[in-house]
DNA sequence: GGATTGACGGGAG
DNA sequence: ACTCCCGCCAATC
């Protein structure tokens, strides 16, 4: 029995709800979102869910970056540039190599 | 229906 | 800091 659609949906929804918890001006990593969503070690699924977001989604997908604090490369300069602009607009700083200091801008699920 | 493919991550070397 | 490698697993080939 493959995973029923209802189950996949709730999994997606938990991931999206978690992304929605990341406040403006902060970023979370794929692994962190997966962990907080109760899906440890399933970071790739987070990426998949974000990839499948409909174009007009209001979800703050731009606040999700990889574990090294970089915008995930996905062969789409358009989206990557948009993500970077949105983050900058929220006050997130990038170093000369396009890296975000997670100590400073990383999301703390507690605070 | 096996193999490949990723918006990833962590450990080893 | 970088390259491999493996875990993870739905979608795609």
Image (tube, coloured by chain):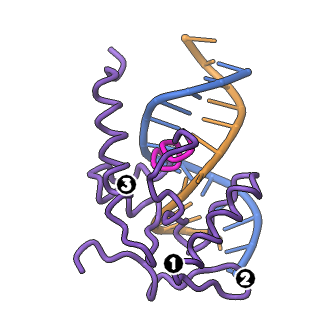
Chain colours: A purple, B orange, C blue
Where is residue A10, by image quadrant?
top left
Which secondary structure lies at badge 1?
loop
Instruction: Tell me the subunit letter for badge 1.
Output: A
Taking the spot 29% from the left edge, 29% from the top edge, the residue there is A7
Which secondary structure lies at badge 3?
helix
The number of callouts visible is 3
Which residue is tagged 2? A97
Q: Is residue A58 left or right of residue A6?
A: right
- Check the picture and name the quadrant holding the C terminus of chain A: bottom left
- Label located before the other in sequence (3 or 2): 3
- Asked if the residue at tag 2 contacts the one at tag 1, i.e. Cβ–Cβ closer than 8 Å, the answer is no
Q: Is residue A100 left or right of residue C1?
A: left
- Label located before the other in sequence (1 or 2): 1
Which secondary structure lies at badge 2?
loop
Q: Position of residue A42 (x, y in %)?
A: 41, 49
Residue A67 highlighted magenta (yes or no):
no
Which residue is tagged 1? A90
The magenta stretch is A45-51
Taking the spot 37% from the left edge, 40% from the top edge, the residue there is A12
Q: Of tags 3 and 1, which is closer to the observer? A: 1
- Asked if the residue at tag 2 contacts the one at tag 3, i.e. Cβ–Cβ closer than 8 Å, the answer is no
Tell me if mark 2 has few (under 14), some (14-19) or many (20+) residues whose alpha carbon lies within 10 angstroms of its own: few
* SS majority, magenta: helix
- In the image, A62 versus B6, the foreground residue is A62
Which residue is tagged 3? A34
Where is residue A86, by image quadrant?
bottom right
Q: Of tags 1 and 2, which is closer to the observer? A: 1
Is label 1 on the same chain as label 2? yes
């Amino acid at each position: 029995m493959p995973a029923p659609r209802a189950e996949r949906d709730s999994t997606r929804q938990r991931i999206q709800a978690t992304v929605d918890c990341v406040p403006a001006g902060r970023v979370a990593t794929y692994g962190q979102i997966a962990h907080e969503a109760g899906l440890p070690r399933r970071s790739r699924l987070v990426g998949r869910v974000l990839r499948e977001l409909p174009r007009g989604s209001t979800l703050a997908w731009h606040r999700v970056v990889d574990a090294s604090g970089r915008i995930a490369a996905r062969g789409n300069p358009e989206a990557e540039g948009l993500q970077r602009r949105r983050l900058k607009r929220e006050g997130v700083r990038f170093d000369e190599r396009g890296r975000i200091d997670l100590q400073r801008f990383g999301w703390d699920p507690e605070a």
